[in-house]
């Protein structure tokens, strides 16, 4: 939810006008993403670094609900996306949707997302993408990749040939690769980026996808329906609905409802709505003169005492103490 958006990222994007994506390119002229465009009602910044012929890395920070991207369709380019903060999902070619939480990866061919919509269910995202032109690397591998016996054709057949995205859950190996890449000083960015981009390619050569280890894919119409359900619940936050009631209203199987909602928003419906109610109550306490009882009713609590208990459990203070603190500050 937007209240959880990190202040440092908000500050980082403060100079970017609303409805704008800033795309900067370092170390020209050799770029895989020559014609990258983005459209959004939010804002974002992408920094693209050319590391080697055929390998580049980009840093992504978005404050948006969704972004539409267009770039050249290059079937031989492998993209590896790492989510650091927030949640992100793609509606890609063929109607497939993959959602990533913190630490998860998405691996796919550049052809599968040449015209794609990226959604941020929590309203923000920070991540890194590594792009590798496997056709170029097959004839011009880096020294490290060549020494390791890098097989570009094997990587293409494993991840690009079917043009279907693969989600890989967070793990210690991938976190060891990506976590050092964030918040680097400028003089260390290129050395680290070059080292770690090659490391992730070597990791993927050894990685064997399976139905047991991959993140579940969903069809786009399912994820769109889940977003419609989420909007309905937050628009009617003063009311409580059971899973069965939601299922019948939106004509969706209860197990599908629960599993897809968690995939998109990262938590079960009940947990998401509890967090939403309490975040909304904080805004109302800061911005209105409504009584505690009125706010409790507006955010869907039967009694003021239940609301106070839930609020204190989350914040460590009562609603009255919270309001007094913000009036003083």
Image (cartoon, rainbow, N blue to C red):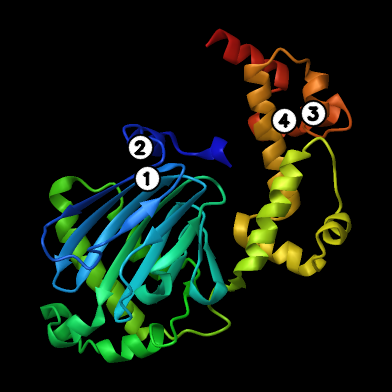
| Distance between the alpha carbons at the discs numbered 1 and 3 | 33 Å
| Distance between the alpha carbons at the discs numbered 1 and 4 | 33 Å
Whether residue 322 can be seen here: no
Q: Position of residue 275 (x, y in %)?
A: 68, 41
Q: Which residue is mark 2?
A: 13
**Mark closest to the chain's N terminus, 4 or 2:** 2
Would you say 307 lies left or right of 260 here? right
The answer to whether mark 1 and mark 3 are in CB contact below 8 A is no
**Mark closest to the chain's N terminus, 1 or 4:** 1
The answer to whether mark 2 and mark 1 are in CB contact below 8 A is yes
| Distance between the alpha carbons at the discs numbered 2 and 3 | 33 Å
> Dot 1 lies on which element?
strand
Q: Position of residue 257 (x, y in %)?
A: 75, 63
**Mark closest to the chain's N terminus, 2 or 1:** 2
10 Å neighbourhood of mark 4: few (<14), some, or many (≥20)?
Answer: many
The answer to whether mark 4 and mark 2 are in CB contact below 8 A is no
Q: Which residue is mark 1?
A: 44
| Distance between the alpha carbons at the discs numbered 2 and 1 | 7 Å
């Amino acid at each position: 939810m937007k209240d959880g958006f990190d202040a440092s990222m908000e500050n980082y994007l403060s100079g970017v006008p609303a409805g704008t994506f800033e795309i900067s390119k370092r170390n020209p002229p050799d770029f895989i993403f020559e014609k990258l465009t983005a459209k959004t009602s939010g804002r974002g910044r992408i920094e693209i670094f050319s590391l080697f012929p055929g390998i580049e890395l980009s840093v992504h920070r978005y404050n948006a609900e969704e972004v539409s991207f267009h770039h050249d369709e290059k079937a031989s380019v492998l993209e590896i996306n790492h989510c650091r903060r927030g949640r992100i999902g793609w509606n890609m070619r063929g109607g497939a949707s993959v959602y990533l939480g913190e630490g998860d990866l998405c691996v796919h061919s550049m052809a599968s997302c040449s015209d794609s919509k990226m959604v941020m269910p929590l309203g923000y995202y920070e991540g890194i993408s590594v792009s590798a032109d496997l056709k170029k690397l097959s004839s011009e591998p880096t020294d490290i990749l060549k020494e390791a016996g890098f097989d570009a054709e094997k990587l293409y057949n494993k991840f690009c040939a079917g043009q279907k995205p693969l989600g890989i859950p967070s793990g210690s190996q991938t976190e060891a690769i990506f976590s050092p890449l964030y918040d680097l000083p400028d003089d260390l960015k290129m050395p680290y980026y070059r080292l770690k981009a090659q490391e992730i390619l070597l990791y993927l050569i050894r990685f064997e996808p399976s139905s047991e280890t991959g993140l579940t894919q969903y069809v786009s119409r399912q994820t769109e329906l889940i977003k419609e359900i989420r909007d309905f619940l937050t628009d009617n936050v003063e009311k409580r609905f059971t899973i069965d009631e939601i299922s019948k209203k939106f004509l969706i199987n209860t197990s599908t409802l629960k599993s897809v909602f968690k995939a998109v928003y990262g938590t079960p419906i009940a947990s998401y709505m509890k967090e939403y109610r309490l975040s909304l109550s904080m805004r109302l306490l800061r911005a209105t003169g409504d009584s505690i009882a009125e706010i409790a009713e507006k955010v869907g609590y039967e009694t003021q005492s239940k609301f106070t208990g839930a609020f204190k459990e989350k914040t460590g203070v009562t609603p009255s103490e919270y309001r007094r603190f913000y009036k003083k500050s």
